[in-house]
Image (cartoon, rainbow, N blue to C red):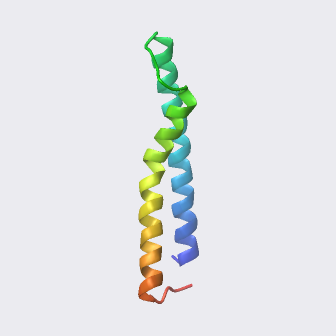
Amino acid sequence: MQTNQLLLLFCTVLLLLGLVAFFVGRAKAARVRASGAAMYAQPDQYAWFAVLSTAGPAVLVGALGSLLLLLLGADIPP
């Protein structure tokens, strides 16, 4: 696979994982709210936290890896 195909695959999988995390997080927060438990935030805020918890580390590792390759002057194939 070429570099641009790997990047597209990585971004697509990351987007899908983020979407799944958003809807699962929001549904869980809505269930907790419906049960009558006190919540400190809205369900959408819990959903965005789930997205950041899911996609954030992957984006951070990808960005740090790219920066490291850039600083080391690695020859990246097209």
Q: Residue furthest front?
A: 40
Q: Where is residue 33 in the image (x, y as percent from the top left)?
A: 49, 16
Q: Position of residue 68 (x, y in %)?
A: 41, 78
Q: Residue at x 47, y 25 (%)?
A: 28
Left or right: 19, with 38 as reference point: right
Q: Which of 42 and 8 is in front in this view?
A: 42
Q: Nearer the viewer, residue 12 or 44?
A: 44
Q: Residue furthest top?
A: 36
* Residue 15, placed above or below residue 7: above
Q: Where is residue 9 in the image (x, y as percent from the top left)?
A: 54, 63
Q: How many marks?
A: 0
Q: Residue at x 55, y 48 (%)?
A: 16
Q: Where is residue 44 in the image (x, y as percent from the top left)?
A: 57, 31
Give the image quarter of residue 61: bottom left
Q: Which residue is drawn at 54% across and 27% down?
A: 43
What is the quadrant of the C terminus in the image? bottom right
* Residue 67, placed above or below residue 78: above
Q: Which residue is drawn at 47% across and 74% down?
A: 66
* Residue 46, placed above or below residue 72: above
